[in-house]
Each structure stands twice: as structure tokens, then as C-alpha cells.
Image (cartoon, rainbow, N blue to C red):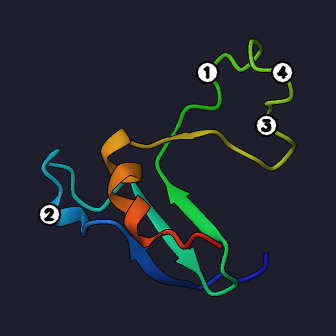
């Protein structure tokens, strides 16, 4: 397995979220410039069949994050 290095958290610190959650979920920027999401695995319980072209390929998982996490991370996501 290839080692992937996270370089920064996007949005608020997990301990500062008003939702009362600490540590997870999170969005992080990787050294490569890509992003990773830490969340709850909902792969087995989500129905993606109504969304044409949306599916999990082998090795992929569908994760859920709070709306607040993504909204708070928006300011840290570059336009390009």
C-alpha cells in the first residue's frame, strides 16, 4: 500500500465544531494536492441507483460527512 501524507485539515478544528463531534468527520488536503474525507462508511446502506453514472468502483467506499464540515471547509478549498 502506498503511503499518503496529509498536510492540513480544511475547515474548523474538530474540537471546535458546534456539533459536539471531535476528530471526525474531517476533510484533509494531501501532499499531492488531492483531498481525503474521513467520515462514516455508508457504502452498504446508500442507494445510488437513481443517480446515473454514480457508483462505487472496486476499492472505493461511500462516506458521509456532516453538511457543516463541508460548508466550513469551503473557505480552505482553492478555486483551482
Tell me the mark number nearer the camera, choosing from 1 and 2.
2
**Mark 4 vs mark 2, CA separation in Å:** 37 Å
Q: Residues within 10 Å of mark 1 (few under 14, many from 20)?
A: few
Task: Identify the mark nearer the N-term, 2 or 3.
Answer: 2
Which is more toward the observer, 13 or 74? 74
Q: Position of residue 42 (x, y in %)?
A: 56, 31
**Mark 1 vs mark 4, CA separation in Å:** 14 Å
Task: Identify the mark nearer the N-term, 1 or 4.
Answer: 1
According to the picture, the residue beneath numbered tag 2 turns out to be 16
SS at circle 3: loop
Q: Residues within 10 Å of mark 4 (few under 14, many from 20)?
A: few
According to the picture, the residue beneath numbered tag 4 turns out to be 52
Task: Identify the mark nearer the N-term, 1 or 2.
Answer: 2
Q: Residue at x 79, y 30 (%)?
A: 54
Q: Residues within 10 Å of mark 2 (few under 14, many from 20)?
A: few
Task: Identify the mark nearer the N-term, 4 or 2.
Answer: 2
Tell me the mark number nearer the camera, choosing from 2 and 3.
2
**5 left or right of 72?**
right
Confirm or deny contact between disc 4 and disc 2 (CB under 8 A). Answer: no
Screen quadrant of the C terminus: bottom right
According to the picture, the residue beneath numbered tag 1 turns out to be 46
Q: Position of residue 12 (x, y in %)?
A: 26, 66
**33 left or right of 19?**
right
Which is more toward the observer, 40 or 36? 36
Q: Residue at x 64, y 25 (%)?
A: 44
Confirm or deny contact between disc 1 and disc 4 (CB under 8 A). Answer: no
**What number is the disc on residue 56?**
3
Q: Residue at x 54, y 75 (%)?
A: 29
**Mark 2 vs mark 3, CA separation in Å:** 32 Å
Amino acid at each position: 500500500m502506498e503511503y499518503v501524507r496529509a498536510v492540513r485539515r480544511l475547515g474548523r478544528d474538530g474540537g471546535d465544531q458546534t456539533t459536539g463531534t471531535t476528530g471526525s468527520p474531517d476533510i484533509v488536503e494531501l501532499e499531492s494536492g488531492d483531498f481525503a474525507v474521513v467520515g462514516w462508511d455508508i457504502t452498504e446502506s446508500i442507494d445510488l441507483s437513481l443517480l446515473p453514472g454514480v457508483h462505487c468502483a472496486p476499492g472505493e467506499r461511500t462516506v458521509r460527512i456532516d453538511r457543516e464540515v463541508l460548508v466550513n471547509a469551503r473557505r480552505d478549498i482553492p478555486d483551482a
